Every structure is written in C-alpha cells, then in structure tokens.
Image: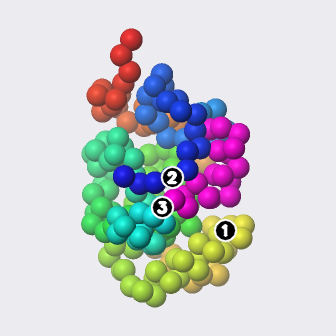
Amino acid sequence: RIYKLQSMYHNCEAASGVQWSTRGDNRVTPVGRVIRKLHIDELPQLWNILLGDMSLVGPRPERPEFVGPLQSQVPGYIGRLKVRPGLTGLAQIQLPPDSAIESVKAKVVLDLYYVEHYSLTLDARILFGTAVYLLGFSYAAVRVIAGLPDVGRREPEPATPLKAPDLIPADAFATQAPTA
C-alpha cells in the first residue's frame, strides 16, 4: 500500500471506472489541486520509505489496476519492476505526467536506463534534479543543471489527454467496473 494525501473526491471512480488523472480533471478537489501543484500529496510516501516499501529514487509506483494492461502494451514495462519504486525518478523529472500510452513508453525507456545504470552518483543527480524541478525549472533545464543522462528519448508529442479506458482495453478492467 502506497500512502498519499487524498486529492480527489471520495469514490469518484465508481461511475467512470479506473482512469488516469488529467490536467483539469474534475475529480480533483479544489484543495487537491493546490496540494498536487505543490507536490505535497506525495509526502506521506516518506512513511513507505521508512517502512522499506519504497526508496527515495526509483521508477514511480503504478496503480495495481494498470500494471497488467501496461505490461501487455508497453515493451519492457516489466523491467521497471525489478527495483523498489521511488518517491522521485529519472522519468518524473524529465517528462510530463502520463497522458497517453506513448508517454508511458517514453518513461519506461528512462526507468529501464535507471534500472540498468543504478549508482549512488545517479541517485544523487536525480535527487538534485528533483530539487531543481521543484524550483520551477523546465525539464530540459533540469537535465542540464543536474547533469542527467540524455538516453536518446524525446518528449512525446503533445496529445489530447486520454482516459485510461481509451488507452487500455475495457475488458482489462472488467473486475473493476461498477455494476448497474
């Protein structure tokens, strides 16, 4: 179980089903918008780190409902699960939040680079890059200032935000769908 401050209305996915949050998502409360903008909704995950469930740096944890479908749709996705999930990661400070399957694929490239090239130096650069990112610098500036590797990925083209059911076959969530 990953801890997080609640930023969405209670039981908001009962009608819509499981889906990724998008910019301007009406499921997010007004207070939730503020805590997300300040990135403090992730602070309770420090408890997960103390418990040993997470580390400071590593690929971000994914909601369990998405792991199976993403494994089948994103080549190499399972490789990111070889390390403990992290509070921050290489992909989070170099790419915007996921909005389409293409953005997940781009992040997996960075996650796999992290898994294959793990070092204390890389962790230190990612932590420094996270601080730079939180100060409001662009993704490109974070990469340069923190001395992060350019692993050949390019930011995906902007796309109309999609909901998870549009990205993942509806039958993947058959057990999650509300009954009428």
| Mark 3 and mark 2: Cα distance apart in space | 6 Å
Q: Is residue 84 above or below residue 16?
A: below
Any mark on residue 45, and which?
Answer: 3
Question: Nearest the camera: 74 or 137?
Answer: 137
The residue located at (55%, 41%) in the rendering is 21
Any mark on residue 134, and which?
Answer: 1
Question: Nearest the camera: 29 or 25?
Answer: 29
Visible in this render: residue 162?
Answer: yes
> Which amino acid is tagged 2?
Lys
Which range of residues does the magenta coloring cover? 28-44
Q: Quadrant of residue 42?
A: bottom right
Please name the predominant secondary structure of the magenta segment in the image.
helix
> Which amino acid is tagged 1?
Leu
Question: Nearest the camera: 37 or 90?
Answer: 37
**Label 2 sits on residue:** 4
| Mark 2 and mark 1: Cα distance apart in space | 18 Å
The residue located at (59%, 72%) in the rendering is 130
